[in-house]
Image: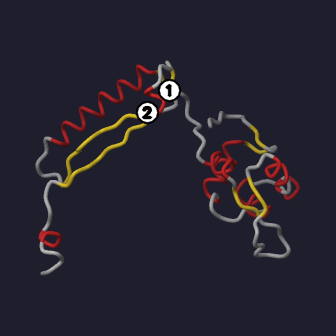
Amino acid sequence: MRLNRGDRIAGVDGLQLRRYFQRFGSGQVNYATVMDELSVTKRQAEKLPELLKLEMISLCEFQHDKKMVSYQTTIRGNALGMAKAGKPVTRASAEEVLRKFLDRVRLVNGRQELAHSVESVVVFGSYLSDAKRLNDLDIAVELRAKWHDAISTNSGRF
């Protein structure tokens, strides 16, 4: 999912709502936290049913406060919390970043004083497609310890 400046969701700025879901993604959602976090009026905050219709939140099974209805984020709400807001990058730009990253890996692996070396690097995601513009450059790195200290080799005995 990608958000752009000016996107509105349930009458709220999409980027602000994304930050809200990032912060309260695993917690309780209610009009009071919406008011505080999004700096909106109570009337605007009570538009939570619009988020319910969009299936971004669902009613909590357990209500902590009988005076205020609580909701929890759904998979869609959590996806909004993880939505990308940066501009797509060109393939050429991603290739340049990858080249510089691999140069850095070679430098790290050549330094004996470092505790770890890079065992492997894997590129995944939109970079593997034929697209000219990419969401981002996804890289996974596996590290390997260069040595084991005395504690780990002596089974914790001193």
Crowding at label 2, few (<14), some or many (≥20) Cα neighbours within 10 Å? some
Nearest to the observer: residue 74 or residue 97: 74
Q: Which mark is residue 49?
A: none
Q: In the rendered view, would you say 15 is above or below 137?
A: below
Dividing the image into 4 quarters, which one contains the C terminus? bottom left
Q: Residue furthest right?
A: 43
Q: Secondary structure at mark 1?
A: strand
| Snapshot quadrant of residue 15 | top right
Quickly name the residue at label 1. Answer: 134
Locate residue 97, reporting x and y percent. 36, 29
Dividing the image into 4 quarters, which one contains the N terminus? top right
Locate residue 67, reporting x and y percent. 85, 74
Q: Residue at x 82, y 67 (%)?
A: 69
In the rendered structure, the answer to whether residue 100 lies left or right of residue 3 reads: left
Nearest to the observer: residue 153 or residue 85: 153
Q: Secondary structure at mark 2?
A: loop
Q: Amino acid at mark 1?
A: Leu
| Snapshot quadrant of residue 123 | top left
| Snapshot quadrant of residue 121 | top left
Distance between mark 1 and mark 2 Cα atoms: 7 Å
Q: In the rendered view, would you say 24 is above or below 5?
A: below
Quickly name the residue at label 2. Answer: 137
Q: Residue at x 79, y 75 (%)?
A: 65
In the rendered structure, the answer to whether residue 139 lies left or right of residue 151 reads: right
Colour setting = secondary structure
Q: Amino acid at mark 2?
A: Leu
In the rendered structure, the answer to whether residue 75 lies left or right of residue 158 reads: right
Locate residue 139, reporting x and y percent. 38, 38
Locate residue 128, reporting x and y percent. 43, 27
Q: Residue at x 34, y 30 (%)?
A: 98
Q: Are marks 1 and 2 in contact (CB under 8 Å)?
A: yes
Q: In the rendered view, would you say 3 is above or below 19?
A: above
